[in-house]
Image (cartoon, rainbow, N blue to C red):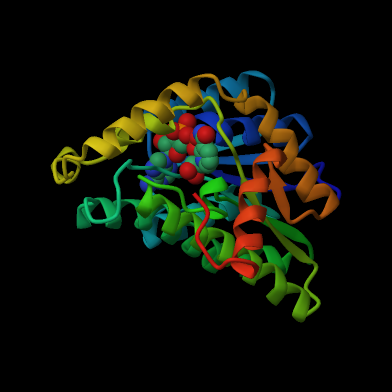
């Protein structure tokens, strides 16, 4: 797909990988709609890109609300009269083992990380197909390929996102659609994801369950991500998938081994790998 002059919508675009995607798309000549729940960060991302002369629009959006996603699509069409690319990237996480994850944490995670992309696909796919070409990418995680300890709700959501995008890509091919789908499975990236409760209603956040295992894991994850890849490196990877119709986008392909060895064990000794 030729992208110059086309319109991209990126959710979770005020920070981290979403902001990097917005920057990369804008630098490549696309018009970009930045959607995020965090109003101040969104305004500053929009003014950063506008100051560089890019054609951008910011729309405050909570991706867990269908009406917000519908309003995002309407604002995009009103401003740019078209939409060709959607990146369902907004996401949050909670560190807690299954059995010590409150129902509020399950719901918060799944509403944003899985229902967000489902709403995105449902609302934007018909609009993108009207253009006769386009692409939908969703941000899953390595946690969408391998369900490690202490991250149950996030693993479930991200496995769902991988399944959503693989199903979508096969459905699109089935009906010879010119629209393509892809999934981004990042390894550790230096973003603000471990501070994702910054956007949460405090009453809802108070419903956490105390878990020593979850807290230890979250502290470990925070240290690991601080040494992770610069999110700016991820924008061009997603652009490459859009331009060259790739499905899998792995920022750390070597980490794919963990999923391979699990699949191997499934066929050999039938035990779950560590
Ligand atoms: N950082 C990593 O190592 C890593 C690894 C794998 C996957 N991911 C995924 O990458 C995606 C981007 O996260 P990031 O790492 O850049 O973190 P980040 O916190 O820097 O950015 C996430 C953005 O999503 C926004 N957001 C949160 N809830 C929202 C909602 N309900 N509606 C709209 N926007 C919302 C936040 O305000 C923020 O701007 C997420 O889906 C995350 O799960 C991150």
Residue at 49% from the left image edge and 20% from the top image edge:
226
Residue at 55% from the left image edge and 32% from the top image edge:
188
Q: In this orientation, does residue 271 appear?
A: yes
Taking the image as shown, residue 204 lies to the left or right of residue 65, namely: left
Taking the image as shown, residue 102 lies to the left or right of residue 249, namely: left
Residue 75 position (above or below residue 180): above
Q: Nearer the viewer, residue 30 or 246?
A: 246
Taking the image as shown, residue 90 lies to the left or right of residue 110, namely: right
Residue 104 position (above or below residue 123): above
Residue at 49% from the left image edge and 25% from the top image edge:
224
Q: Nearer the viewer, residue 270 or 178?
A: 270
Coordinates of residue 61 in the picture (x, y in percent)? 41, 46
Number of numbered labels in the structure image: 0
Coordinates of residue 261 in the picture (x, y in percent)? 64, 54
Q: Nearer the viewer, residue 225 or 217?
A: 217
Coordinates of residue 268 in the picture (x, y in percent)? 64, 67
Q: In this orientation, does residue 58 appear?
A: no
Residue at 46% from the left image edge and 60% from the top image edge:
70
Q: Residue furthest bottom?
A: 175
Residue 126 position (above or below residue 182): below
Coordinates of residue 44 in the picture (x, y in percent)? 48, 22
């Amino acid at each position: 797909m030729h992208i110059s002059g086309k319109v991209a919508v990126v959710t979770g675009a005020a920070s981290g990988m979403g902001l990097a995607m917005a920057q990369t798309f804008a630098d490549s000549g696309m018009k970009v709609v930045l959607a995020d729940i965090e109003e101040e960060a969104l305004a500053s991302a929009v003014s950063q890109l506008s100051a560089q002369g890019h054609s951008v629009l910011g729309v405050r959006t909570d991706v867990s609300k269908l009406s917000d996603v519908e309003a995002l699509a309407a604002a995009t069409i009103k401003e740019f009269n078209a939409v060709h690319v959607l990146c369902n990237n907004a996401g949050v996480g909670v560190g807690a083992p299954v059995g010590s994850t409150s129902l509020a944490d399950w719901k918060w995670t799944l509403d944003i990380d899985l229902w967000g992309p489902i709403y995105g696909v449902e609302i934007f796919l018909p609009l993108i197909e009207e253009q006769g070409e386009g692409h939908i990418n969703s941000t899953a995680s390595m946690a969408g390929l391998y369900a490690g300890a202490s991250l149950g709700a996030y693993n479930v959501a991200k496995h769902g996102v991988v399944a959503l995008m693989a199903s979508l890509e096969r459905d699109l091919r089935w009906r010879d659609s010119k629209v393509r789908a892809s999934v981004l499975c990042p390894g550790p990236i230096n973003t603000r994801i471990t501070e994702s409760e910054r956007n949460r209603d405090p009453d809802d956040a108070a419903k956490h369950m105390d878990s020593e295992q979850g807290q230890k894991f979250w502290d470990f994850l925070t240290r690991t991500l601080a040494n992770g890849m610069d999110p700016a490196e991820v924008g061009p990877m997603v652009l490459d998938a859009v331009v060259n119709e790739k499905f899998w986008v792995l920022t750390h392909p070597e980490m794919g081994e963990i999923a391979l060895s699990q699949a191997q064990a499934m066929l050999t000794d039938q035990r779950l790998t560590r």
